[in-house]
Amino acid sequence: MIRSGLVFAASALALVACSSAPSMTDSAATPTVTQPVDEFALAMQTVNQLVEAGNTQTAIDRLTQLAGDPDLSQEELAETLLRRGELRFSEQGYDLMGAISDFEEIINDLPQTEAYSAAVPMLDIARGKATSLNTLLVQPETTRQEKFNILMELGQHQEAIDLMIQSNLTPDNDTLVAMYQIGYLCEGDELTGREYDAIEPDGTERTLRFCDFGK
């Protein structure tokens, strides 16, 4: 009886020990695995968010900063240039010649990357568009307002601004917003010259003047 009682007691103690020991599936015993942050993917996500919010010029600036990162792989650099070229070529990009340069850089310097196959047809389309715009630019029937729009689209911004001021032209709202984002137009009581009213994509109303007037 004594032996049986000892065996029972030992079994009871073993059960208590097992019930009190931490489980291998306990969250405290499971090491937390931290996934590495993909900084490039986050940067491209930021670019897409800026574009969706209507801040295309700011997105282009972000891509320009990213393209200057010496730690980018060739694939990442090519993807950055392709995205910047696409945005520069877009309706809100106002830099067709810059887009052509981006596509050419991919084709000439990064032919082994995945972006190459997309850059080739994009370059052909962009060059064709540039040829058409330059032809239209020199036509005598092209109005000054149309010439301004063409120069802005090509990315010849200073020539466009000179024509705008000389001819007292009024760009449409999208162009004014782009000129504000790029940094040609600013807000400020210290500025002089003609005022231009613009509404940003988020509904913000701004009264703008050329940034270098009155400083």
Image (cartoon, rainbow, N blue to C red):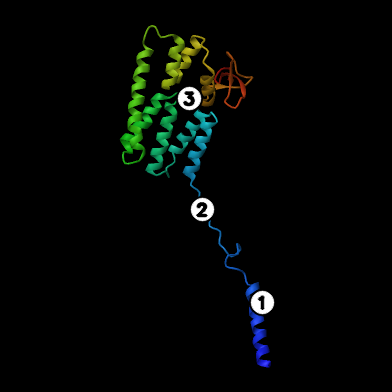
Amino acid type, callout 3: Gln
Q: Residues within 10 Å of mark 3 (few under 14, many from 20)?
A: some
Circle on res. 35: 2
List x then y, in percent, for residue 36: 50, 51
How many marks the image carries: the answer is: 3
Q: Closest to the observer: 211 or 94?
A: 94
Q: Residue at x 45, y 14 (%)?
A: 148
Q: Residue at x 44, y 12 (%)?
A: 146
Q: Residue at x 35, y 33 (%)?
A: 119
Q: CA distance from mark 3 to mark 1?
A: 71 Å
* Residue beneath disc 1: 16
Q: Earlier in the sequence, mark 2 or mark 1?
A: 1
Amino acid type, callout 1: Val
The answer to whether 94 is drawn above or below residue 162 in the figure is: below
List x then y, in percent, for residue 147: 43, 13
Circle on res. 197: none
The answer to whether 87 is drawn above or below residue 132 in the figure is: below
At mark 3, the secondary structure is: loop
**Quadrant position of residue 205:** top right
List x then y, in percent, for residue 70: 42, 42
* Residue beneath disc 3: 92
Mark in front: 2 vs 1:
1
Amino acid type, callout 2: Gln
At mark 1, the secondary structure is: helix
Q: CA distance from mark 2 to mark 1?
A: 38 Å
- The reply to whether callout 2 and callout 1 are in contact (CB within 8 Å) is no
Q: Earlier in the sequence, mark 3 or mark 2?
A: 2
List x then y, in percent, for residue 172: 52, 16
Q: Residues within 10 Å of mark 2 (few under 14, many from 20)?
A: few
At mark 2, the secondary structure is: loop
Q: Residues within 10 Å of mark 1 (few under 14, many from 20)?
A: few
The answer to whether 1 is drawn above or below residue 86 in the figure is: below
